[in-house]
Image (cartoon, coloured by chain):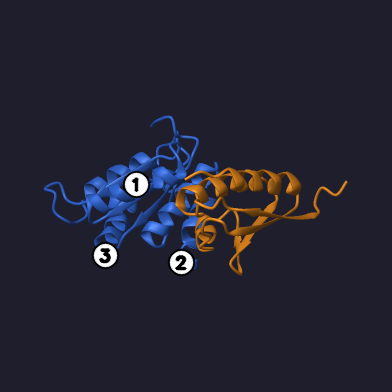
């Protein structure tokens, strides 16, 4: 992995590489440079969709035994299906380092990133992402 | 020694700096570095100072007075440092 292995990471899965990439930039700006944000978005030909192989690859990378694990956020629809399918391919050991958060994509990712940047553990980062369901904007 | 007493201080955001995403991120990171519980109130709302989304939900614009309160270990130090961060925020 990389220099960021002591921090929990964030995985963003979207239909669109622009959505995933833009959100990754936003999370990076608010959370700072230490949190690894991995993205899977769009199909290899650039069209909208979720590439199951790409999702599996980034989940495997995020679940690396030298890291602190990662919280996974999805936009909707096939992203969710692709993550579910990929989870079925991971080993039990890898699964201990992955938490999938049922949360709003943008808010959950920002909450997860900021919380991860404080050095919080996987469970705490996932809880921060899930809290995004209940926090009002106004 | 009242290490776990409640501490409350007021801090005013600089006139030109709202507590939007990046400043709120700095604030939440500092708050999260303390073991005590920390809350911040403004505009009649109260937020857990360790939750970025709750802090953003305050909708605190430049010049808003924030009430910082902490309870538990290192509470006084937490509100002191957070108040200093608030006062020194730049756009």
**Which residue lies under the disc numbered 3?**
A77
Q: Residue at x 45, y 36 (%)?
A: A34
Q: Chain of mark 1?
A: A
Distance Cα–Cα, label 3 vs label 2: 24 Å
Please state if A12 lies on the left or on the right of B90 as rendered. left
Given residues B88 and A59, the one toward you in this image is B88
Q: Secondary structure at mark 2?
A: loop
Q: Which tint is chain B?
A: orange
Q: Quadrant of residue A106 in the image?
A: bottom left
Q: Nearer the viewer, mark 3 or mark 2?
A: 2
Q: Which chain is blue?
A: A
Q: Position of residue A75 (x, y in %)?
A: 31, 60
Q: Are marks 3 and 1 on the same chain?
A: yes
Mark sitting earlier along the chain (2/1)? 1
How dense is the environment of label 3, judged by Cα within 10 Å: few (below 14), some, or many (20 and up)? few
Q: Position of residue B48 (x, y in %)?
A: 60, 59
Q: Chain of mark 3?
A: A
Q: Nearer the viewer, mark 3 or mark 1?
A: 1
Q: Is residue A43 visible?
A: yes
**Which residue lies under the disc numbered 1?**
A24
**Which residue lies under the disc numbered 2?**
A137
């Amino acid at each position: 992995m990389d220099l960021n292995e002591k921090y929990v990471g964030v995985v963003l899965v979207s239909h669109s590489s622009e959505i995933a990439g833009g959100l990754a930039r936003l999370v990076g700006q608010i959370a700072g440079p230490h949190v690894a944000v991995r993205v899977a978005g769009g199909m290899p030909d650039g069209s909208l969709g979720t590439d199951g192989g790409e999702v599996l690859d980034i989940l495997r990378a995020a679940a690396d035994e030298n890291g602190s694990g990662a919280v996974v956020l999805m936009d909707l629809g096939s992203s969710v299906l692709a993550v579910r399918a990929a989870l079925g391919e991971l080993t039990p050991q890898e699964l201990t380092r992955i938490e999938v958060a049922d949360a709003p994509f943008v808010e959950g990712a920002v909450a997860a990133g900021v919380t991860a940047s404080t050095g919080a553990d996987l469970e705490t980062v996932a809880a921060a992402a899930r809290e995004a369901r209940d926090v009002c904007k106004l | 020694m009242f290490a776990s007493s409640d501490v409350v201080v007021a801090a005013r955001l600089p006139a030109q700096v709202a507590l939007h995403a990046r400043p709120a991120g700095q604030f939440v990171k500092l708050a999260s570095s303390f073991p005590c519980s920390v809350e911040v109130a403004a505009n009649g709302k109260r937020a857990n100072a360790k939750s970025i989304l709750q802090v953003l939900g305050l909708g605190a614009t430049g010049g808003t007075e924030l009430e910082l309160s902490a309870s538990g270990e290192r509470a006084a130090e937490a509100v002191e440092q957070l108040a200093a961060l608030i006062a020194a925020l730049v756009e």
